[in-house]
Amino acid sequence: MLFSSISFLYYFFAAVLLLYFIVPFKFKVFKKKSGDYVYFEAKNFVLFLFSFFFYFYGEPVYTLLMIATTVSSYIHGLLIDKFRGKRLSKVFLWSSVVTSIAVLGFFKYSDFFITNVNALFQSDIALLKLALPIGISFYTFQTLSYTIDVYRGDAKVQKSFVRLATYVALFPQLIAGPIVRYTTVEEDLTERKHTFEGFASGVTRFVVGLSKKVLIADSLGALARTLMASNDKSVAMYWIYAIAISFQLYFDFSGYSDMAIGLGRIFGFRFLENFNYPFISKSVAEFWRRWHMSLGTWFRDYVYIPLGGNRVSLPKWIFNTLVVWFLTGFWHGADWTFIIWGLYFAAFLMLEKFALKKVFEKIPKVFSHIYVVVVILISFVIFSANGLSGALSDLGGMFGAGGLPLWSGATSYYLSSYALILIFALVGSTPVVKNTVLKLKEKSTLGKVINVLEPIFVAVMLLVVTAYFVDGSFSPFLYFRF
Amino acid sequence: MEKKLKNIVVTSVFITFIAFFVVMCGVCYFNPAESSDAERRPLAQFPDKITWSGLVDKTVIDAFEDYSVDQFPFREFFRGIKARFQFGILGLKENNGLAVEDGYIVKIEQEFNDKNVEFSLGKLSAFYDRFIKDNGGRHFISLIPDKNYFFGKDYGYPAPDYEWLNEQVTSTFPGMTYIDIYNALELEDYYRTDTHWSQDKILGVADKLAAGMGISDLLSGQYKENRLEGFQGVYYGQSALKPKPDTLVYLTNDVLDACTVYDYAKNTTGSIYNFDLFGGKDGYDFFLSGTRPLLRIDNPNSTSGKTLVVFRDSYGSSLTPLLVEAYDTIYVVDIRYIDANSLSMYEKMKMVDFEGADVLFIYSALIINSVSFK
């Protein structure tokens, strides 16, 4: 089920809202001999049930796989905690890690490995052709973070299966992130506040995310598809394509994260931010501190630092960096283009560390900004390409390979048609609007005006996105495939 | 407004908004719409059976998704909002592939689909080889440009390569005489809300064809203009913008009034214009009763002794009457709805006779660029 659909907004979400806010957070079930009460956590249970239905609705066959992953994490967590300080604790940690990675590897990467083995050894092993379970990369990383954090002592073991299952399956972040660490919501699972402020800010954030996805990302997606299908291509058209898909990816994924964070707030959860205006970065390193932050910090905390981080010899640091960015690329998809995409960033991070950082300190910031934008545009062309040959062809187009003209009639037409959306996207990718609103809010009169405008904005945008749903502006979120 | 009050208002607005449409969805569940007049298609209904296997294989879920969108309350209102937002706020030049300028609604096409064109010309070619090639008559072919050809030129929108399409047509049918009608047309000759041309504006096209076919002397070109108000073309509903409806104009004279039209599939005889169909889903069906597989127009006033076979689409329905004066009999064939075997059956039963007849293939680029033929 997509957030940007009638079925979600007016059926599923309406039902879960009603039930969630009708039931108490918890109520006494019975009194134990010790005198303590056993509670039934009704709100968590509602979220747990609806979240599983949410997953079942989108991926009926693989619902059992997600339940099995949750049960595995639950049991491993208990065992790690039970044998804390003993060798068995580490054994169960590794068992948990291997199980999670094996499941992810089998369902996501089997055919990639088989294809490469076949190519390398001229063998003819049949492909498994498994459908990729929706959101498997996200919930696998979440369950991994749970067992690792329990082992490290960063998180307390969760003895309530419903609470842990609610965390893993929590529908706002289940299928397209952000990767919410267990420690982030540990407290909220046990006790959380439901306030008008939380609900209202959640609603506004959700509507902003929905609008970003439906109005900007999907429109730019349509532009990118049209440009690639055109027979009247030009060098400029390839660059417009690069801009369109870069903004599409940003508004799609950050829009989804906004929705997830907003929905979380409505239900009293406080998820961390996943994007922080990455396109204003002045280095690739900064870009990755602002883009898909939950993934970046996950790899930092569970791979990079355990490997030794940057407090190691130069060759080891280079090795660590390559490993992390190989995995980052591979996480995004079972294809060499994603691996190259990850290593492409590793190359620029090294280049910045050894050479560019010093250069950037001496030149005007605008040049470092232009450098980042060009590097990012090229990266997303690789990311979105249809295989390696497709990536080479698209990149070739950007640099005039094959005698492409610089401009064409179709380029003019599409640029003029999509100019406003591209401008909206450009402005929306910077903190200009947010900062302006915050500044205006500081002034008491204007702050009151903005408070009046906010509910109007919510209603109007809901009306518009609903119009897009009804007219069939249906397109799946890009990050579902990860 | 204070922040605390604002939070209450935002919460209330959101819940009220959702709740209102949830209730309205419930109303729609009990009163589902069968079809959409604007989109000219049936609307999805609530899944018939909800079974476990249907849930697991997602057929029920997919059916529910379709239902939830198709049966959403105030559907046309929302489609209108989307169209206005696309054009007015986002500044896009198209909504669902339709562009609007000065009231003209046009489907924008970038290029022809070479596979579709190859398929269509292949089908036409097969009919030509089987029924026409050796009939001993004269053979003509013409191509009708879509209005996007003229719209693109007038308003700076892209249009497919019509030169390429003409080359495909002429090279596929070297034995037919190609009659170019492009310069007899302009954007104003087409309806604003429809894809079709207006009959009163294609007298120049009829003249061109008549000249090419050598029948100019047999056509009077004298007609009386008649009007039917409230013609909502195919783009009227699709655009969701509630544009001003067109006026359908049709031409009559004594010859046309006297003609009879025999419908082979229905075994009925009627007249050139079918008033019953004007108020139907497609008002353009008014001409020759619309999408009929095989018709025969008998002209009792003709003394030419000539027969014409027209292979056509709906554009031909309004054009053919303008050629009637020159022929005793005109067979009108629409191979979107009749296959070669059925046509052959009529031939064997001597119900049609193409021997020695003039033959005109006249198709719109729209149809040639689609997979419409049987």
Image (cartoon, rainbow, N blue to C red):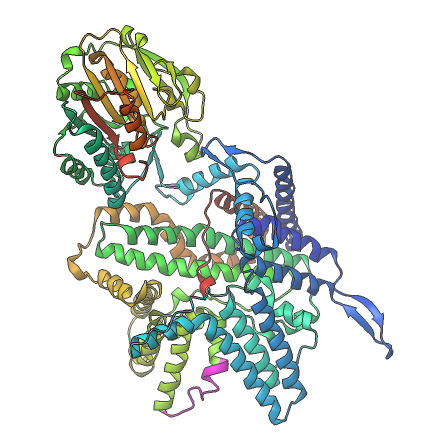
Residue B177 seen by the camera: yes
Is A48 magenta? The answer is no
Instruction: Please give the name of the residue rendered at 34% of the width and 53% of the height, measured from the top-left corner.
Output: A225
The front one of B35 and B51 is B51
Q: Where does the magenta region start and end? A: A301-313
As drawn, A86 above or below A218? below
Q: Is residue A406 left or right of residue A26?
A: left
Quarter location, residue B173 = top left
Q: Residue A362's x, y, as percent?
A: 29, 77
Q: Residue B89's x, y, as percent?
A: 42, 43
Q: Residue A298's x, y, as percent?
A: 50, 76
Q: Is residue A439 left or right of residue B350?
A: right
Q: Is residue B188 left or right of residue A27?
A: left
Instruction: Please give the name of the residue rendered at 64% of the width and 77% of the height, measured from the top-left corner.
Output: A74
The front one of A330 and A440 is A330
Instruction: Please give the name of the residue rendered at 33% of the width and 67% of the height, measured from the top-left corner.
Output: A379
As drawn, A286 above or below A172? below
Main SS of the magenta part reads: loop
